[in-house]
Image (cartoon, rainbow, N blue to C red):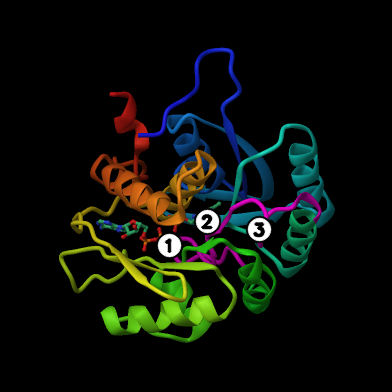
Amino acid sequence: MLTAPPAGTAPRRVLTVAGSDSGGGAGIQADLRTFALLGVHGCVAVTAVTVQNSVGVSDVQEIAPPIVAAQIDSVTSDIGVQAVKTGMLASAPIIHAVAAAFDAAGIGGDGLPLVVDPVCASMHGDALLAADARSTLVEVLFPRATLVTPNLDEVRLLTGIDVVDEVTQQAAARELHRLGARWALIKGGHLRTSDRSPDLLYDGKQFHRFDGPRMDTPHDHGAGDTLAAAAAAALAHGHSLPEAVAFAKEWVTRALAAAYPLGAGHGPVSPLWRVR
Ligand SMILES: Nc1ncnc2c1ncn2[C@@H]1O[C@H](COP(=O)(O)OP(=O)(O)O)[C@@H](O)[C@H]1O
Ligand SMILES: Cc1ncc(COP(=O)(O)O)c(N)n1
């Protein structure tokens, strides 16, 4: 388990570049919850404010791209971070601004670990990335990414591959690696035909399978964010990529088991089991 350092000592820092979820289930709010419970100080570059609750996203206000980039500059030039995670990026101009700020700060590529959760839509089907920005996400951010963590809908939108079994999951992993990601994790949460929820990791050489029992719950809001945030936290603590993914898979599985209802729709996964 990842833990905080002694009192008075600065913990590891992780920067999340993502959108705000007013319902507190996904996005920045989910990332910060997982970071704190894993002994990491979370920093934030807000990309968009979503008007969101348990049933959906009713409005979005994007943040001006120079302000998104300035948040990244401000945090990295003063506080310093050991890993970075991206979630909702909203638009192509924001993606370009984020990539330029990452290059200036040595984030991604051969620099600091960069986890890219290629968020395209909320679980309710509401758009969180402009359709014309999908190719930008792939062309601009994937070659910088240490790890990309698409769900099966995102795999379909970004690569055209329909994952229905292990063979197609492997094909998707190969394609994401070809598109530039050093490691690709194809999440199996949406493979609803199985009683398992298998995630497949690939680095161009070897497949690693991270299996878990499928939980029968409608309360899975923020699962993808929680997985990617936990992986980023483990990387910031110095773990290898496969170790970080194994840790994150266990973390999200426990958070799914502790998920709770909120509102009339989908409640959030809960890392709060850690403080029981
Ligand atoms: N019902 C479930 N039972 C067990 N694990 C799940 C379930 N739904 C999702 N997961 C796991 O949670 C993580 C997030 O997966 P997924 O739901 O595919 O992503 P997203 O939240 O981005 O749509 C993955 O590790 C996946 O295997
Ligand atoms: C701001 C923000 N970021 C990410 C998600 C994706 O999470 P989910 O797939 O659980 O809806 C979201 N709904 N809102």
Q: Is mark 2 within 8 Å of ligand 2?
A: yes
Locate residue 242: give its quadrant. Answer: bottom left
Residue 48, percent from left and from top:
67, 52
Which badge, 3 or 2, is on the more N-terminal residue? Answer: 2
Visible in this render: residue 265? no
Please name the amino acid that badge 1 sits on: His
Tell me the crowding category of disc 1: few under 14, some 14 to 19, or many 20 or more residues within 10 angstroms, Cα based. Answer: few
179 relative to 227 in the view: left or right: right
Q: For numbered disc 1, what is the local secondary structure?
A: loop
Locate residue 79: give its quadrant. Answer: top right
Q: Name the residue carrying label 1.
A: 124
Tell me the crowding category of disc 2: few under 14, some 14 to 19, or many 20 or more residues within 10 angstroms, Cα based. Answer: many
Per the rendering, the mark at residue 57 is 2
Q: Nearer the viewer, residue 191 or 109?
A: 109
Chief secondary structure of the magenta portion = loop
Residue 84, percent from left and from top:
61, 48
Tell me the distance, in whole angstroms, between the alpha carbons under discs 3 and 1.
Answer: 30 Å
Which badge, 2 or 1, is on the more N-terminal residue? Answer: 2
Q: For numbered disc 2, what is the local secondary structure?
A: strand
Residue 8, percent from left and from top:
58, 13
Q: Nearer the viewer, residue 133 or 5?
A: 5
Tell me the crowding category of disc 3: few under 14, some 14 to 19, or many 20 or more residues within 10 angstroms, Cα based. Answer: many
Toward the left, the furthest residue is 195
Is label 3 or label 1 in front?
Answer: 3
Quadrant where the C terminus is found in the figure: top left
What range of the chain is rendered magenta?
A: 104-129
243 relative to 86 in the view: left or right: left
Please name the amino acid that badge 3 sits on: Gly
Q: Name the residue carrying label 3.
A: 108
Residue 155, percent from left and from top:
46, 76
